[in-house]
Image (cartoon, coloured by chain):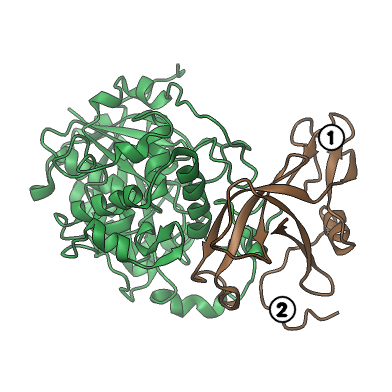
Chain colours: A brown, B green
């Protein structure tokens, strides 16, 4: 299917990371737990960075977290496609289960965010194929 | 420590630069040959004597080693080419020191060139239609970029480091502005600096526009064109050449692991998947090897691609404890004439972004006593540091 009018960069989906992106497309967030050493790992990887095992289960996460920090991007100095979103928030979100995600905070006043505030996942269906994990204040 | 102690065994004997400018509209080959001619003249060497070469490829388009050899007519028996990023200065000089002391080459040239898309890069744009970016890797970019979330530049990613730093340690915008002001002030005594004759006050900084808060325009280094060349040989050969050899006294490499991975943050900053937490600078090999410590350093050189780098680098090497660099850098601390001058050339922020190779040129000229109005009195030991762990100490040879 065509990606329509979406001009911004999209993740490169390939066999190693496909379950992560398929889960998001199904509006679930899943990450890999090592079946050998039990490490919950992120970013997505074909191997466990602790024990080098390839064994995984794709564990469903709650989609809840807290806002560690953020920037408000006021000038699109990289890809000009981001200009239409200015000002937008890029944030570090600590998921309840542990991993820290680099993501966006949406459905908010970019200038009224607070450190440590609770956030929850928003499944952003940016194209028919790709759903991004963004977050909004609870 | 080392099986073969390289302290003061290799040295820098020639430095050469081109004009530095925002746009020069000269090709990378033309620039890099000009820098080579100047470095050969500085060292008193002939082109035929260069038999080793290291380059890290310019940005966005420099010169690959083989095309440079074809154009320049060099006759080499040892070459090395690094990744196309501005972080290989120390690694290059360590490799050169290893090469000349092991005998795989006698005189190693290190040369690198920067061009920009609005300058000579225009001529290459039609060949670079690819959409690939490091920020699209599963692990993100080397500064923590994730392009599909709009964190698609090293600057924005570094701003996130700065935000974490400021919230964790209570640092302010005014304190961060002192970094850019210090380097700009130093550049006023360097006629080669792109920002020469353009002084800046903290008020100018505070009034400059935000790009990605907390970063304002002046928290970013320059983007520009030009070329830098250095020549490395053994101390034994150097003593036959025309200028005082500058000894490579101590060094350590870029460090890298899952928590020491973001190229503009020291460990503990919690950007990307790096863990956040307390940080204590441990013993650093560079001091052990050079047989000096922080208090012996006469001036410091920092990879200042973004303002936050100065704080994280100072803390990484123990010039102040973690969380205190924002106090350390106040006032004239880093200015020429201050307690410990930093980036006496103006740095990447005010002399120009030549990946730190320009800082190394400045270190050599300072140790030789060639810096005129900006000369650091009695400069005997100078150090290069980065947030990502590499470092080098150069001293006046004998």
Quadrant where the image shows the N terminus of chain B: top left
- Circle 1 marks a residue in which chain? A
Horizontally, residue B46 falls left or right of residue A50, namely: left
In-front residue for pair A104/B113: A104
Dot 1 falls on a residue whose secondary structure is loop
* Image height of A118 relative to B293, above or below: below
* Residue B29 percent across, percent down from the top left: 38, 67
> In terms of image quadrants, where is residue A80?
bottom right
Tell me which numbered mark, 2 or 1, is placed earlier along the sequence. 2
Dot 2 falls on a residue whose secondary structure is loop
- Circle 2 marks a residue in which chain? A
* Residue B63 percent across, percent down from the top left: 44, 63
Badge 1 local density, few (<14 within 10 Å), some, or many (20+)? some
Mark 2–mark 1 distance (CA, rounded to whole Å): 37 Å
In-front residue for pair A29/B114: A29
Horizontally, residue A64 falls left or right of residue B377, namely: right
Q: List the residue tagged with mark 1.
A: A53
Q: List the residue tagged with mark 2.
A: A6
Question: Disc 2 vs disc 1: which is toward the camera?
Answer: 2
In-front residue for pair A134/B186: A134
């Amino acid at each position: 299917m065509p990606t329509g009018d979406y001009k911004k960069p999209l993740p490169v989906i390939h066999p190693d990371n496909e379950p992560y992106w398929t889960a998001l497309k199904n509006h679930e967030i899943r990450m890999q737990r090592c079946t050998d050493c039990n490490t919950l790992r992120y970013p997505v990887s074909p191997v466990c960075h602790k024990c080098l095992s390839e064994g995984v289960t794709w564990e469903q996460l709650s989609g809840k977290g807290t806002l560690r920090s953020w920037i408000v991007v006021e000038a699109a100095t990289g890809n000009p496609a981001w200009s239409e979103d200015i000002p937008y928030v890029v944030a570090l979100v600590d998921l309840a289960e542990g991993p820290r995600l680099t993501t966006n905070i949406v459905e908010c006043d970019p200038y009224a965010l607070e450190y440590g505030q609770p956030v929850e996942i928003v499944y952003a269906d940016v194209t028919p194929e790709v759903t991004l994990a963004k977050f909004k204040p609870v | 420590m080392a099986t073969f102690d390289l302290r003061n065994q290799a040295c820098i004997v020639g430095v050469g630069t081109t004009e530095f400018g925002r746009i020069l509209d000269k090709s990378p080959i033309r620039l890099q040959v000009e820098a080579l001619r100047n470095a050969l003249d500085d060292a008193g060497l002939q082109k035929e004597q260069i038999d080793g070469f290291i380059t890290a490829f310019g940005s966005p388009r420099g010169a690959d080693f083989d095309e440079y050899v074809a154009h320049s007519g060099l006759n080499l028996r040892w070459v090395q080419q690094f990744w196309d990023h501005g972080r290989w200065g120390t690694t290059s000089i360590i490799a050169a020191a290893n090469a000349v002391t092991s005998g795989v080459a006698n005189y190693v040239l290190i040369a690198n060139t920067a061009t920009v898309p609005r300058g000579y890069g225009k001529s290459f744009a039609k060949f670079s239609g690819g959409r690939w970016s490091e920020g699209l890797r599963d692990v993100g970019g080397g500064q923590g970029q994730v392009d599909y979330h709009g964190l698609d530049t090293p600057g924005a990613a570094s701003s996130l480091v700065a935000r974490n730093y400021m919230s964790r340690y209570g640092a302010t915008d005014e304190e961060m502005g002192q970094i850019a002001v210090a380097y700009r002030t130093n550049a006023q005594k360097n006629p080669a600096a792109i920002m020469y004759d353009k002084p800046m006050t903290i008020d100018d900084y505070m009034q400059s526009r935000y790009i990605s808060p907390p970063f304002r325009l002046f928290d970013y280094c320059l983007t520009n064109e030009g070329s830098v060349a250095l020549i490395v040989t053994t101390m034994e050969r150097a003593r036959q050449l025309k200028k005082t050899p500058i000894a490579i006294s101590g060094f350590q490499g870029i460090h890298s692991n899952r928590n020491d991975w973001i190229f503009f943050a020291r460990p503990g900053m919690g950007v990307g998947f790096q863990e956040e937490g307390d940080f204590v600078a441990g013993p650093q090999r560079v001091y052990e090897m050079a047989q000096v410590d922080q208090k012996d350093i006469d001036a410091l050189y920092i990879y200042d691609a973004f303002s936050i780098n100065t704080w994280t680098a100072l803390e990484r090497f123990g010039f102040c404890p973690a969380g205190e660099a924002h106090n350390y850098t106040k006032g004239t601390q880093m200015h020429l004439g201050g307690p410990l001058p930093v980036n006496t050339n103006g740095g990447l922020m005010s002399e120009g972004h030549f990946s730190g190779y320009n800082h190394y040129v400045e270190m050599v000229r300072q140790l030789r006593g060639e810096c005129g109005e900006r000369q650091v009195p009695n400069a005997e030991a100078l150090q290069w540091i980065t947030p990502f762990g590499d470092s080098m100490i150069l001293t006046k040879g004998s």
